[in-house]
Amino acid sequence: MVRTARALVHALQALVALVLVGGVVTRNPSVAVNALLGLLVTLAPNALERDYGVVLGPLPALWVTLAVLLHSVGMLGLYDAIVWWDHLTHTLSASVVAGAAYAAVHAVDLHTDDIYLPPPFVGALLVVVTLGLGVVWETAEFVARDLAIAFGFRPLLVVYSLEDAVVDLAYNALGGLLVAWFGTTRLDRVSRELEGRLQGR
């Protein structure tokens, strides 16, 4: 299982790299930059394990890499060609954010007896954090687009309308809810790894 998951991670990373090459060859900075940044994100789980001793296991890495791949492929035109592609990528990316938030918050909860966070509060917190970061991201997209146009550059991110941003936030909330409902028990081991680092183990 572990070996298979790692092989899948490497395969998905290779596909993201192919998207990057395609963006460079076709001189499409939106595709190339998004794929490059995404590829760097997929290296984060290994970096945490190598540099900080936090062993996340292959499944979180697979989760992150799949989200990156779907976004990178979307930049090739699927965002325009398939209506629900944007909804899928926002839900999956938001679930990654919510998963990271849960692992961190639960690690702090385990680390100190002075804090007790009941599950309903944690679930609500995940949705709030996911929505908050979603608002920051959507705002950054609009600002980046306007700055690029003002300076005569091609925008690197696809921006449609305010209505589309609101829909994106709704799917961000869905990603947070999915983690709150189904993902917390699967992330407990990651939280305990982080808590071990807080303990200095």
Image (cartoon, grey):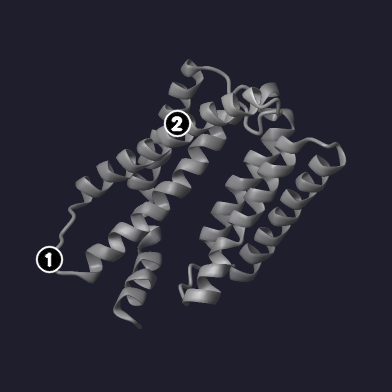
Identify the residue at horizontal 78%, vertical 35% (top origin): 28
Q: Of the residues shown, which amino acid type is indicated by label 2?
A: Tyr
Identify the residue at horizontal 64%, vertical 65% (top origin): 6
The Cα atoms of the two marked residues, 2 and 1, are separated by: 34 Å
Where residue 125 sits: x, y (%)?
A: 27, 44
Q: Quadrant of the C terminus?
A: bottom left
Q: Circle 1 is placed at which residue position?
A: 114
Name, please, the residue furthest toward the left: 114
**In which quadrant of the rendered view does residue 84 lie?**
top right
Q: Quadrant of the N terminus?
A: bottom right
**In which quadrant of the rendered view does residue 43 lie?**
bottom right
**In which quadrant of the rendered view does residue 45 lie?**
bottom right
- Number of the label disc, if any, that sits on residue 157: none
Where residue 31 sits: x, y (%)?
A: 73, 38
Q: Is residue 197 left or right of residue 41?
A: left
Name, please, the residue furthest toward the bottom: 201
Look at the numbered disc 1 and give the secondary structure of its residue: loop
Where residue 122 sits: x, y (%)?
A: 25, 49
The mark lying in front, picked from 2 and 1, is 1
Identify the residue at horizontal 35%, vertical 65% (top origin): 191
Q: Of the residues shown, which amino acid type is indicated by label 1?
A: Asp
| Label 2 Cα crowd, 10 Å radius (few <14 / some 14-19 / many 20+) | many
Q: Earlier in the sequence, mark 2 or mark 1?
A: 1
Q: Is residue 68 above or below residue 190?
A: above
- Number of the label disc, if any, that sits on residue 171: 2
Where residue 157 sits: x, y (%)?
A: 62, 32
